[in-house]
Image: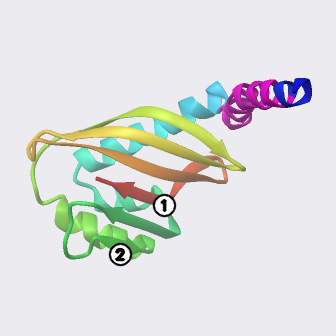
Amino acid sequence: MKIRLLQTLAAFAISLAAPALAEEQNTVDPEVRQEIEAALTNFDEAYNKNDATAVAALFTLDAVEAWGWEKSLSTVSGRQAIERRYALHLRIPGKFSSNLVQACAIGDEICAISEFYHVYLKRKGYSVRIYVREGDTWKIRMEYAN
């Protein structure tokens, strides 16, 4: 009976400690978080200038992007396809803004969750992006927005 109680208490203690350990391991350095916030700002600025080439340059060559609200072309892959998508999409007027909600490390990559708002479309949504380091900058390898 005492052994069973000790096992239960040990399991309970481990279950409380595990999320804290996982959180420590996935914590993003404050400097990296600022770099990801700067990448979001660069995206917003390129988008608001209606510059599809500059938006696409923020993605890796083999990037994949999926939009939950698009029926046709819901998923595109490759920087050129992403640029073509934005060239069409940026014909819609309006300002776009995003705000980083959470960032966590996944090995050498960063998973960033952000909230966005498009003024003209009155669309509020969330984006999940996987950023990878290319040289001195962070590039988007994968994005899902809805």
Q: Considering only vertical position in the picture, is 104 above or below 128?
A: above
Query: Which mark sits nearer the N-terminus, 2 or 1?
Result: 2
Residue extending farthest right: 3
As helix, strand or loop, the secondary structure at mark 1 comes to strand
Query: What span is colored magenta in the figure?
Result: 7-27
**Quarter of the image with the N terminus in it:** top right
- Residue 129 spot, x, y in % from top left: 47, 51
Q: Nearer the viewer, mark 2 or mark 1?
A: 1
Identify the mark at residue 85; answer none if there is no mark: none
Q: Which residue is mark 2?
A: 81
- Residue 108 spot, x, y in % from top left: 71, 50
Q: In 3D space, how far apart are the residues under numbered discs 2 and 1 (Cα atoms)? A: 13 Å
Crowding near the residue tagged with mark 1, few <14, some 14–19, many ≥20 C-alpha atoms within 10 Å: some
As helix, strand or loop, the secondary structure at mark 2 comes to helix
Query: In the drawing, does residue 98 fall left or right of residue 119?
Result: right
Crowding near the residue tagged with mark 2, few <14, some 14–19, many ≥20 C-alpha atoms within 10 Å: some
Query: Could you tell me which residue is drawn at 44 percent across and 41 percent down?
Result: 113
- Residue 99 spot, x, y in % from top left: 36, 32
Identify the mark at residue 142; answer none if there is no mark: 1
Query: In the drawing, does residue 58 fall left or right of residue 125?
Result: right
Q: Is residue 26 magenta?
A: yes
Q: Amino acid at mark 2?
A: Ala
Query: In the drawing, does residue 103 fall left or right of residue 46?
Result: right
Q: Amino acid at mark 1?
A: Met
Magenta stretch: dominant secondary structure: helix
- Residue 18 spot, x, y in % from top left: 73, 33
Query: Could you tell me which residue is drawn at 39 percent across and 37 percent down?
Result: 41
